[in-house]
Image (spheres, rainbow, N blue to C red):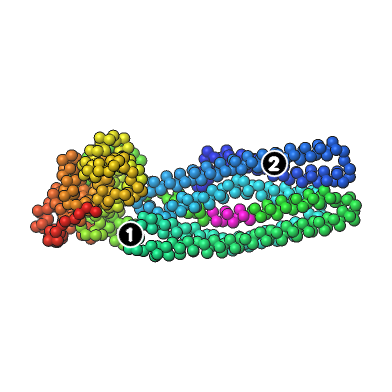
Amino acid sequence: MIKKLAASVREYKAPSLLTLIFIVGEVIIECFIPFITAQLVNNIKGGVEITELLKTGLLLFVLAILSLTCGGVAGYTCSKASAGFAKNLRHDVFSRIQTFTFSNIDKFSSSSLVTRLTTDITNIQMSYMMLIRIAIRSPLMFIFAIIMAYRMGGSLAFTFVIVVPILIFGLLLIAKFAMPAFRSVFRKYDKLNESIEENVRGMRVVKGFSREEYEKKKFFSAAENIRKDFVKAERIVALNNPLMQICLYFNMVFILIVGAKLTIENKGTVIDVGQISAMLTYGMQILMSLMMLSMIYVMLTMSAESAKRVCEVLSTSPEIANPENPVTVVKNGDIDFENVSFKYSKEAKRFAVKNINIHIKSGQTVGIIGGTGTGKSSLVQLIPRLYDVTEGEIKVGGVNVKDYDIKSLRDSVAMVLQKNELFSGTIKDNIRWGDENADDEEIIAACKLAQADDFITSFPDGYDTYIEQGGTNVSGGQKQRLCIARALIKKPKILILDDSTSAVDTKTDAKIRQGFKDYIPETTKIIIAQRVSSVESADMIIVLDGGEVSAVGTHDELMKSSSIYREVYEQQVSGGDNDAEE
């Protein structure tokens, strides 16, 4: 885990190393200042010339400036290194997520991935900052201060034999009881983010069903669970301060009483006022070092859970990868399903699609009809390798899809999925997702083909109209047509429409299909639809039932041979298929 995270430090190794160097310098100087101060106090007591006093004062001033400089530079390099490390780590995690297949994404919820990219990485950043600065400074300060304390105080330093074990034991006990509460918090962050995400995405539904109060209660419950865990943990961690104060004041009282007695009885021959003042300073440094180490321990234990969650993403390899010598050119839109079966996981008992044998020629229009859950979407997602087949093989252009370069294959296949997604930006920006180099004329042509040009030009800003995140400022039918235009501008060899005209009226649907026939005759078109009218004129119609092919043929052939197709058609005709655009 440490090795995997350390790989994200990269170009920030230099500032990380500089932080360590300047921290060492700061600690050494801070430990010498009380030593020199003690000598100055003793010299003043014994009588010293003003010139010697000024020299020592100047030396202390210079050391203080050097210590301040080392601390300031260490703070700068530390912040640069930790922020840069977090930036690289977020980039690495986000880049890994981009390589995920649908099956990989199925393992993580979107809210969980957001938490890992934000809260978890922030915790890791804080831990890294503490590691390269405080985790180095505190042990060094502890060691140097102990050495100097015994050097200055002799037997008086034995106070630390009593105080230090008590403080260490107490801090470890506090951390032990606080950690379980801290660990549980991060899992509950996922629930909180999930509540926020669902509410924001489904705001129209929430308001349509007047469920605002229910959503408030659900959010409050998630937030309250996090609050309770944090309160429980912080109550325990809050004991650090009184424990520290007890040890600090015990140490102070012990040094003052015993030190004063030794000074008076031995007339400063064993220990003097300067040593007592130095011992007080070293005692503070030792105890503060232990206090900071306990804080580091708490933070690192908290971050360990975050680190595991982040490394879980980094360790997840995409289940679909390029072959060693991939084919980079897709010749045409021929598609062959040969004994194809597929299930979403190895543990799944049931196949989503089974024993599929279909042969589609380039340029054909193919319709797919079937009830909910019959495997229509699962089948077409196998073509661009969004999932890999469990059994059998799929060929595109005569080549097994597993032999293609993934990007080349997917660039040749355009999909308009059931859940249409538009991104924040102008209409032009969204259309150019299909081809970033497309000019305005190509964009307009694609939109006309998708029957989107009329409503786009009715907007005051036309093609420069800003689309809100998720396309919330356009209707369902408009969103579908923009997504079709985005797919068309790719100039694909295979175009897949997964129930992508369900929100447009039948007249517009017919115009879109006629446009396909006239303007992209060489593109293989696969149309999944609930309406028979959307696939009635297709060259081939596939009827799926229970994940298997029930019948294949033209509309006329299926009306004679397929009871399922005939029943769907008769129900829609008798029911009056008069869908209107949303």
Residue shown at 83% from the left, 39% from the top = 53
| Foreground pick, 6 / 278 | 278
Q: Which residue is mark 2?
A: 67
Q: Position of residue 68 (x, y in %)?
A: 68, 41
Q: Quadrant of residue 413?
A: top left
Magenta segment main secondary structure = helix
Mark before the other along the chain sequence, 1 or 2: 2
Q: Position of residue 52 (x, y in %)?
A: 84, 37
SS for tag 1?
helix
Q: 26 and 203: which one is in front?
A: 203
The amino acid marked with disc number 1 is Val
Say which amino acid is labelled 2. Answer: Ser
Q: Name the side, left or right, on which 324 lies relative to 77.
A: left
Q: Pointer 1: what residue?
A: 205
Residue 289 visible:
yes
Q: Position of residue 60 (x, y in %)?
A: 76, 40
Q: Secondary structure at mark 2?
A: helix
Query: Is 243 part of what is drawn in magenta?
Result: no
Residue at the location (12% across, 51% down)? Answer: 554
Instruction: Compute the Cα span from label 1 to label 2.
Output: 60 Å
Magenta-highlighted residues: 294-303
> Residue 300 in magenta?
yes
